[in-house]
Image (cartoon, rainbow, N blue to C red):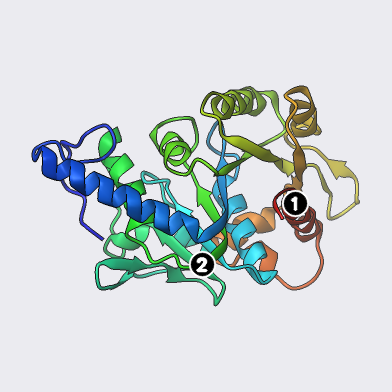
Amino acid sequence: MTEQTDTSRGPEGQTCSSGGSSEIAHRLQDKMIETSLERIKHKLLVMSGKGGVGKSSIAANLAVALADAGKRVGLMDVDLHGPSIPQILGLSGQLETKGKVAVPKPYSEKLGVVSIASLMPEGDDSATIWRGPLKIGVIRQFIADVKWDDLDFMVIDSPPGTGDEPLTVAQTIPDAYAIIVTTPQEVSLADVRRSINFCKQVDMKILGLIENMGPFACPHCGKEIALFKSGGGKRTADAMSVPFLGSIPFDPQMVVACDAGTPIVEQKGSTPISEAFEDVIKNIKNRVL
C-alpha cells in the first residue's frame, strides 16, 4: 500500500498538487475499488451512535462466527484513531504485501483482517492525528490496494458517530448495509436514533439493530439482572421501523475474551452469549441470503 503522509489532499482523497495527473490517478483508484467490491457479495458496516457500546467486539465476533459457519469473510477496521480489532482477535505483526497490494492478515482460513494497527510498528502507541481528507484516502486504499479476493461477507468496523469514516464507507460502498449497535439505556438510544437518521440521509440500507450488554442471569441465584435497563433496543427499532437483530447479554467473559484475543463465539460449550450470537447471525443471514 502507498504510505499516506501528504495531508494536503482533495475532498475525495486525491492529491491536490498535480492537477490532471491526480484526476487520472483518482479515476484509476475508482476502477480498482469497483473491481474489488464486485468480488464481495455482502458488505456490512457495523456502526454506533456513541462509544462504549461494544461495537468492535460485536464486529469481530460477527466476522468470526460467519467464518466459522463456512463463509468467506473479510474484516476491515476503519476505526483509524482507535483500532482495536487486532487486539480482540489476538493478531500481531504488520500486513504483508504481494507486489503493490497488501494481503489481509489471516485470522483463519476463512477470515482475513485489515486494520491501520497492522500498518504500524509493533508496540507503537503514537496517536493518529489525521484530518478528514487523509482518512478518506486511507479507507479508499483499504479497498483498492488490498487483495480481498472473493468474499461472501465484508464486515466493516467503524468508529462511533457519524463522521468521516462511516460517511466515506457510505459513499464508497453504496450497496453496504448498516448494522447499528446500542446498549439498552436512553443515553445510548438517543445517539442510535441519530445513526438511523444518518443512514436515511445518505441512502444506506439498515440491516438492523443489535442491542449489546442486555440483561443476564446472575451466576449465583439465576435472577435476571439488567445493568443498563432492558428492552430499549427492541423498542427503538420498532419505533424507528428498523429490524431488530437480537440482544446480546452482558457477560464479563466478553471483556476477558477481548483482552486475551480469543473471540467469545469460539469458546467451547453453549452459553447465553454464544446462543445470542447464533440468533443474531441467523437473523443476518435471513435478511441478506
Q: Quadrant of the N terminus?
A: bottom left
Please, what is the three-letter code of the amino acid marked with disc 2? Asp
Along the line of sight, which residue is nearer the eye, 59 or 179?
179
Give residue 72's quadrant in the image: bottom right
Label disc, if present, on residue 280 of the rendered structure = 1
At horizontal 51% and vertical 62% (from top left) the residue drawn is 74
Tell me: residue 189, above or below residue 88: above
At horizontal 29% and vertical 51% (from top left) the residue drawn is 29
Q: Would you say 63 lies left or right of 136 here?
A: right
Could you tell which of marks 1 and 2 lies nearer the N-terminus?
2
Number of other residues with Cα within 10 Å of mark 1, as a class: few under 14, some 14 to 19, many 20 or more: many
Residue 166, given in percent of the width and then of the height, sits at: 46, 37
Along the line of sight, which residue is nearer the eye, 135 or 86?
135
Task: Count the marks.
Answer: 2
Residue 64, given in percent of the width and then of the height, sits at: 61, 64
Number of other residues with Cα within 10 Å of mark 2, as a class: few under 14, some 14 to 19, many 20 or more: some
Tell me: residue 70, above or below residue 161: below
Give residue 152's quadrant in the image: bottom right
SS type, badge 2:
loop
Please, what is the three-letter code of the amino acid marked with disc 1? Val
